[in-house]
Amino acid sequence: MKTLPNLIENNRKWAAKVRAEKPNFFAELAEIQSPKHLWIGCADSRVPANQITGLAPGELFVHRNIANLVVHSDLNMLSVLQYAVEILKVQHVIVCGHYGCGGVRAAINSQPNGLVDNWLRHIEDIAVINWSHLKALDYEARLDRLCELNVIQQANNLGRTTVIQEAWNRGQKLEIHSWIYSLKDGHICDLQDPIDHCTEQLQ
């Protein structure tokens, strides 16, 4: 396991490599950020947003939490969303979950998990609504499908937020995407068509 001094040393090597490849990179980055994408993803350390999308620092605005939830009472998420949409003028908001999500797994297991259970109730609700479909699947397939359904629900939740609705009402170009990442092969899959101001299920 790397120690903190190792991490700082790694940082110095990384910065030197970046400067060697693009001498003005940090000077330009320090002036302004202009990402076109907001990423709402899981806090899982195996799903690093910039790396898996091939984007450099400054190209992706990121918010992460347990199980990539979009909760209308979460002021942290809503503040990030408002800044990204109203100030940075991002054009794409991506909800990206991943298969094998520990938060989703914990939500459908019967064991208590402490404080996080309050957060995971949002996933439990999704499982209850879709139980007639989920119960026919074996456990791992059920977990995978619930990971997908969770992403889709969170994307729909985003489309109903005041921030997004007001952006669409003023004609701002903005799409919401529902993605899922596979830890087994490193691939991202798109789960449904982008959500925009014309999407019927949000009316």
Image (cartoon, grey):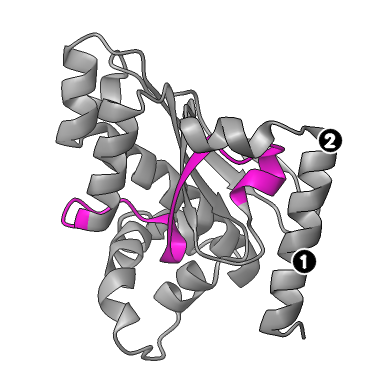
Q: Which residues are magenta?
A: 49-75
Residue 178 visible from this viewpoint: no
Element type where label 2 sits in the image: helix
Q: Amino acid at mark 2?
A: Glu
The quarter of the displayed image where residue 153 is located: top left
Residue designated by label 2: 21
Q: Amino acid at mark 1?
A: Asn
> Is residue 66 a member of the stretch shown in magenta?
yes
In the rendered image, residue 34, in percent from the top left (x then y), is placed at 47, 27
Residue 173 vs residue 123, the one in the foreground: 173
Q: Residue at x 31, y 80 (%)?
A: 117
Which of the labelled discs sits on residue 10, or is there none?
1
In the rendered image, residue 104, in percent from the top left (x then y), is placed at 47, 67
Which of the labelled discs sits on residue 18, or is there none?
none
Can you name the residue that lies furthest to the top here? 171
Element type where label 1 sits in the image: helix
> Is residue 50 a member of the stretch shown in magenta?
yes
Q: Residues within 10 Å of mark 1 (few under 14, many from 20)?
A: few
